[in-house]
Amino acid sequence: MESKGTSVFGAMLVAGIALVIAVGAGAWAAGHYSAKTVTVGSGTTTPVASGPVDPTIAAGAHTFVQFACAQCHGEQGKGGVSPVVPALDTIGKTLTAAQLRHIIDHGLGVSSNPTRPYMPVWGAVVSNTQVNDLVAYLHAGLPAVDGATPVSAPTGQGAAVAGAALYVRYGCINCHGPNGLGGVPNPSAPDKVVPALSGAKFFKQFNTDAKIIDVIRSGSVIGKAPIVSMPHWGGIIPEADLQALVAYIKTLKSS
Ligand code: HEC
Ligand code: HEC
């Protein structure tokens, strides 16, 4: 038995349990406790202070982080990243499910030659279930969900190490695949897939850091929805992170 649980005593009394044997000295830990108590004459179990989150809303929160919605719209959609990217905490509740689904699937504000971030087209990349989860999360007001936090880049370990984490944090991996292998279906695009960020063809075309950084900043619109294009990240990804992403990409297979 663990030596935790005296503070559970009050709660148990409230619950009207006849006998509680709390073992050892107790402590509250981060909103809940792992008390081991023995109750007699009652089927009541130890109360859990932090209640369960609706699984659909929780999944939406994780999806929001996975697809880097949080990198443009701010964590929990609170905004503050760029003046051209709206916060979502209010609008998320006012738009209907159909409107939200349409915006996520088809994008918003896409221009043929973007000079600023626009809402990317996600329909070919994000599944129906994931869109439903996102809608539930937006309708719930983007609550904090345990573990739904973007991965942070290690510091002091070199640009390539940071870049590998940023490749996940900014959601590049969802479209360009692990290790920049590409091959993610983009059925309506001329190539039918999102390109690799590795291999001889890639490194022949993108043979300088500046060329790689330019395309990440500007994006590249290859068509309208349902075609998925390269988002415009200028004004979203800071210069140092762009350098780190390039350092990581250059570690990938070149032949
Ligand atoms: C590259 C940056 C970027 C990413 C990543 C991104 N968005 Fe957006 N989003 C935008 C911009 C910019 C707009 C505003 C477009 C406009 O109105 O011209 C927008 C608009 C929206 C809107 C409409 C808000 C309104 O006020 O009408 C919703 C909803 C939304 N995004 C949800 C999401 C979700 C969910 C994700 C993740 C799957 C996501 N966004 C990822 C940039 C981004
Ligand atoms: C929504 C999907 C999506 C996301 C997210 C995305 N990309 Fe792209 N990216 C594309 C598509 C599609 C192209 C091809 C554009 C074209 O052919 O003009 C592309 C092109 C590129 C290119 C040029 C490669 C080529 O052959 O044209 C680079 C470099 C690149 N992306 C890097 C990144 C990085 C780094 C990130 C993360 C910060 C990222 N991309 C996030 C879809 C995406």
Image: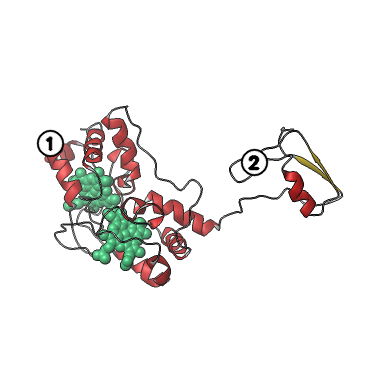
What residue is disc 1 on? 208
Label annotation for residue 107: none
What residue is disc 2 on? 28
Q: Is residue 66 left or right of residue 45?
A: left
Locate residue 201, reporting x and y percent: 16, 40
Secondary structure of residue under mark 2: loop
* Type of amino acid under label 2: Trp
Tell me which corner region of the image, top left, top right, bottom left or bottom right, holds residue 30.
Answer: top right
* Type of amino acid under label 1: Thr
Q: Residues within 10 Å of mark 2 (few under 14, many from 20)?
A: some
Q: Is residue 203 left or right of residue 7?
A: left
Residue at the image position 67 percent from the left and 38 percent from the top: 27
Label 1 lies in ligand 2 vicinity (Cβ under 8 Å): no
Locate residue 100, reporting x and y percent: 37, 67
Label 2 lies in ligand 1 vicinity (Cβ under 8 Å): no
First in sequence, mark 1 or 2: give its number.
2
Residue at the image position 47 percent from the left and 63 percent from the top: 136
Which quadrant would the C terminus be assigned to in this image?
top left
Residue situated in front as seen by the camera: 32 or 66: 32
Locate residue 121, reporting x and y percent: 28, 60
Q: Residues within 10 Å of mark 1 (few under 14, many from 20)?
A: few
Name the residue furthest top: 157
Residue situated in front as seen by the camera: 76 or 108: 76
Residue situated in front as seen by the camera: 31 or 184: 31
Tell me which corner region of the image, top left, top right, bottom left or bottom right, holds residue 180.
Answer: top left
Q: Is residue 192 visible?
A: yes
